[in-house]
Image (cartoon, rainbow, N blue to C red):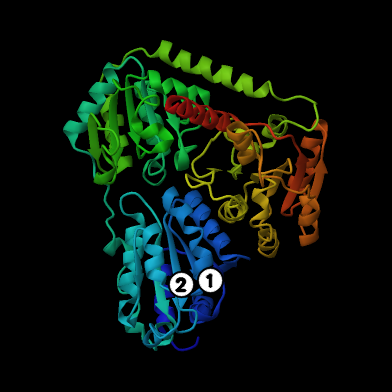
């Protein structure tokens, strides 16, 4: 091996964290890091755009439940990567972004590709720092990982100048501590009195619900949550990264906790007690106010960060602690209590779910162009228990988000609150990398697929096959439908009809084109069996999704109220 350098210090710090893969595009100012990684046995997954590397890291962390790493060159490489960071930040995924830059003594002199990287990253990370001395590499890397996983998870950034990477190091300077020695390993329980109050509220409620969301993904054990739900009989909804934490097929789980995507969730407004596990009171739940949660409902909020508790709506019981530990506390406490028979409440939810799903299925027919629901109904029987399902954005995809079941944590991925279009493609690559024995399904529209089409080349180079089911309506569907509803005309939302299956074939993957409903399933099966990154291009009509319907209804109501 070549002489030890500062680059080796950083790479060994990553290894101590259990990092196996780094997502990257190689460039000038990270060449020492890349070379050191080859010495240390870390594998690079090189993409065709730095934002795609960020997207892969996002999905990899969400699937594995562990922090992931992106490494990019400074300047334009960093600015490309940072376009993906807001999505990771709002999604609350622990991603460590390492960037190189020109030599430290030249900073402020208009040095090579110099931009204020640390300052640019600060608004969309939990922490952003420059490593200014070789002696600080190990502890600043530790700080980055500690920060990424503390409280509610999120991304962090480190910039390391090229000259710091190249400085000579010794074995004595290698990272001296293990992660268990520089990061809290305990699981802080909630205040026992607060836990008892929460159980009192839930046990006395006639129509209680639990909503598990983002932060629950990294802290809650599925079996513990299932135990709490089954002991208490309290029905549960999931959303964001918590989708699949308890299966939609469980009789007490009623799917996505968003009434726009899942009309069953509209009954949350009838609940007299609502417990939020790792869910911020943000716009997705109407800030915890009516019509999402009744003004008279008792609100219990469990979170790992104090600033989230009671934000936007006061909580009747606010429990600060490790969310998983609190769930286990409540599960044990639930066993010692008498619980109401909630049969009539859960029956109402089950009826609402059936009515909604039947309504979705009613859109499917042989009429051409095909409705999105015909596509999802044809593909649904092919999706296995252990498969990973990825949803990009756009109207076509929303039909599937409201219909297809989430069965396991980290295996039902959507873009996140920011809805960064196109990230579905790098998400699918990372899904196959993280779960190589699982089939990976990507549902994406023709607008979204244009952002990172060349990542099909990344999939081929790294042998990461997945099956893309593309809905092609030749428009920016959701925005066009908004325009027609709001203004009566569409502007700049038309696309050309492109055979994306041919594009993927030209790159080296498997492609098919479908127009008939009876052709969908056979074509998708052939794509799945091809062993290649594949894309089935399906001609569909632009049909406004339930999500878009809800958005239009809300905006029209506000317009009417404003006169």
SS under mark 2: strand
Q: Quadrant of the C terminus?
A: top left
Classify 10 Å Cα crowding around label 2: few (below 14), some (14-19), many (20 and above).
many
Q: Quadrant of residue 214?
A: top left
Q: Quadrant of residue 7?
A: bottom left
Q: Is residue 448 above or below residue 252?
A: below
Q: Nearer the viewer, residue 437 or 89?
A: 89
In the picture of the structure, the residue carrying the numbered disc 2 is 99
SS under mark 1: helix
- x 28%, y 39%: residue: 311
- Mark number for residue 77? 1
State left or right for residue 168 relative to residue 390. left
2 or 1: tag closer to the N-terminus: 1
- x 30%, y 17%: residue: 205
State left or right for residue 493 relative to residue 328. right
Where residue 167 appears, as percent x and y from the top left, is 40, 87
Query: Disc 2 versus disc 1: distance between alpha carbons?
Result: 8 Å
Where residue 96 appears, as percent x and y from the top left, is 42, 63
- Mark number for residue 173? none
State left or right for residue 388 relative to residue 122. right
């Amino acid at each position: 091996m070549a002489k030890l350098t500062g680059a080796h210090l950083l790479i060994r710090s990553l290894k101590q964290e259990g990092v196996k893969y780094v997502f990257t595009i190689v460039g000038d100012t990270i060449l020492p890091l890349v070379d050191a990684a080859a010495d240390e046995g870390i594998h690079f997954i090189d993409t065709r755009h730095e934002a795609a590397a960020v997207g892969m890291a996002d999905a990899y962390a969400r699937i594995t439940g562990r922090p992931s790493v992106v490494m990019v060159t400074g300047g334009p490489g960093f600015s490309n990567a940072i376009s993906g960071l807001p999505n990771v930040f709002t999604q609350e995924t622990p991603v460590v972004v390492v960037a190189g830059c020109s030599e430290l003594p030249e900073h402020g002199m208009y040095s090579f590709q110099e931009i204020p990287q640390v300052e640019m990253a600060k608004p969309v990370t939990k922490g952003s720092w420059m490593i200014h001395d070789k002696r600080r590499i190990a502890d600043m890397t530790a700080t980055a990982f500690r920060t990424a996983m503390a409280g509610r998870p999120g991304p962090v950034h480190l910039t390391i100048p090229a000259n710091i990477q190249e400085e000579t190091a010794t074995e004595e300077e290698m990272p001296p501590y293990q992660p268990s020695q520089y990061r809290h390993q305990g699981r802080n329980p909630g205040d026992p009195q607060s836990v008892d109050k929460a159980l009192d509220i839930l046990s006395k409620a006639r129509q209680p619900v639990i909503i598990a969301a983002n932060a629950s993904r990294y802290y809650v054990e599925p079996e513990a949550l299932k135990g709490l739900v089954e002991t208490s009989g309290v029905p549960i909804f999931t959303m964001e990264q918590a989708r699949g934490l308890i299966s939609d097929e469980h009789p007490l789980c009623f799917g996505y906790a968003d009434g726009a995507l899942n009309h069953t969730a509209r009954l949350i407004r009838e609940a007299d007690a609502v417990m939020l596990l790792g869910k911020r009171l943000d716009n997705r739940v109407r800030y915890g106010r009516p019509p999402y949660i009744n003004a008279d409902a008792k609100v219990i909020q469990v979170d790992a960060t104090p600033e989230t508790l009671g934000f936007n709506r006061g909580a009747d019981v606010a429990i600060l602690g490790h969310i998983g530990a609190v769930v286990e506390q409540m599960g044990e406490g639930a066993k010692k209590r008498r619980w109401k028979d909630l049969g009539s409440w859960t029956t109402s939810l089950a009826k609402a779910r059936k009515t909604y799903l039947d309504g979705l299925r009613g859109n499917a027919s042989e009429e051409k162009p095909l409705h999105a629901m015909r596509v999802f109904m044809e593909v649904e029987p092919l999706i296995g228990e252990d498969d990973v399902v990825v949803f990009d954005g756009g109207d076509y995809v929303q039909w599937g988000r409201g219909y297809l079941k989430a069965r396991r944590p980290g295996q039902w991925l959507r873009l996140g609150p920011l809805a960064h279009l196109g990230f579905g493609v790098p998400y699918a690559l990372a899904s196959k990398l993280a779960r190589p024995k699982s089939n990976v399904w990507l549902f994406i529209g023709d607008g979204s697929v244009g952002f990172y089409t060349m990542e099909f080349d990344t999939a081929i180079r790294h042998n990461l096959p997945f099956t893309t089911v593309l809905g092609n309506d030749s428009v920016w569907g959701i925005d066009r439908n908004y325009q027609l509803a709001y203004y009566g005309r569409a502007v700049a939302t038309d696309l050309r009809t492109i055979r994306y299956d041919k594009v993927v074939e030209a790159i080296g993957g498997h492609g098919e084109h479908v127009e008939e409903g009876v052709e969908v399933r056979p074509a998708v099966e052939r794509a799945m069996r091809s062993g290649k990154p594949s894309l089935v291009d399906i001609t569909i009509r632009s049909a406004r999704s339930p999500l878009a319907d809800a958005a239009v209804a809300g905006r029209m109501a506000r317009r009417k109220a404003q006169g």
